[in-house]
Amino acid sequence: MSFFEKTEKGILVRIKLTPKASSNSIDDLFQDENGVFWLKAKVTAVPENGKANKALVNLLSKIWKIPKSNFLFVAGELDRYKILSLKQVDSLDEFKNKCGKILPQQKLDLILFLVYTWFNI
């Protein structure tokens, strides 16, 4: 498994967010007790009135070069564990290329292995 999956509605991304951090960043992958992978992100914004969520979307939009309007919260708006839908990202290859911009090569290799295994590519 990976921190994202393609569905008929687009690509879903699972993120574990840490608000009130010292900087805005994408850090690593995290595997929870159920074996589900999450992308770890940190933002300096506080988790009040949607400020941390807005900072997360700003961060991902900037790194992945995806318009902010293409992000939709599917679950977790009031939780650290969030699931976002990416509209108008049509292919896994396109998204994998965007992921390569934020993750070290060895993490990207792991993700690609998981994607190829999961989607039988």
Image: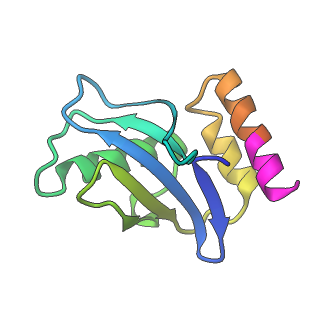
Residue 59: quadrant of the picture: top left
Residue at coordinates 74% horizontally, 43% vertically from top-left? 114
The residue positioned farthest toward the left in the image shown: 48
What is the x, y in percent for residue 107? Answer: 65, 27
Q: Is residue 121 above or below residue 19?
A: below
Residue at coordinates 11% horizontally, 57% vertically from top-left? 49
What is the x, y in percent for residue 32? Answer: 49, 42
The boundaries of the magenta stretch are: 114-121
Residue 100: quadrant of the picture: top right
Residue at coordinates 87% horizontally, 56% vertically from top-left? 120
Lateral position of residue 21 relative to residue 82, left or right = left
The residue positioned farthest toward the front in the image shown: 33
Residue at coordinates 80% horizontally, 57% vertically from top-left? 119
What is the x, y in percent for residue 5? Answer: 64, 59
> What colour scheme governs how the chains and residues are painted in the rendered image of this protein?
rainbow
Lateral position of residue 27 relative to residue 21, left or right = right
Inspect the magenta stretch and tell me whether residue 118 lies in it: yes
What is the x, y in percent for residue 105? Answer: 69, 23
The residue positioned farthest toward the bottom in the image shown: 8
Lateral position of residue 54 relative to residue 59, left or right = left
Lateral position of residue 97 relative to residue 54, left or right = right
Instruction: Give the main secondary structure of the magenta stretch.
Output: helix
In the rendered picture of this protein, how many numbered marks are placed on residues?
0
Q: Nearer the viewer, residue 74 or 10?
A: 74
Quarter of the figure with the C terminus? bottom right
Inspect the magenta stretch and tell me whether residue 9 lies in it: no
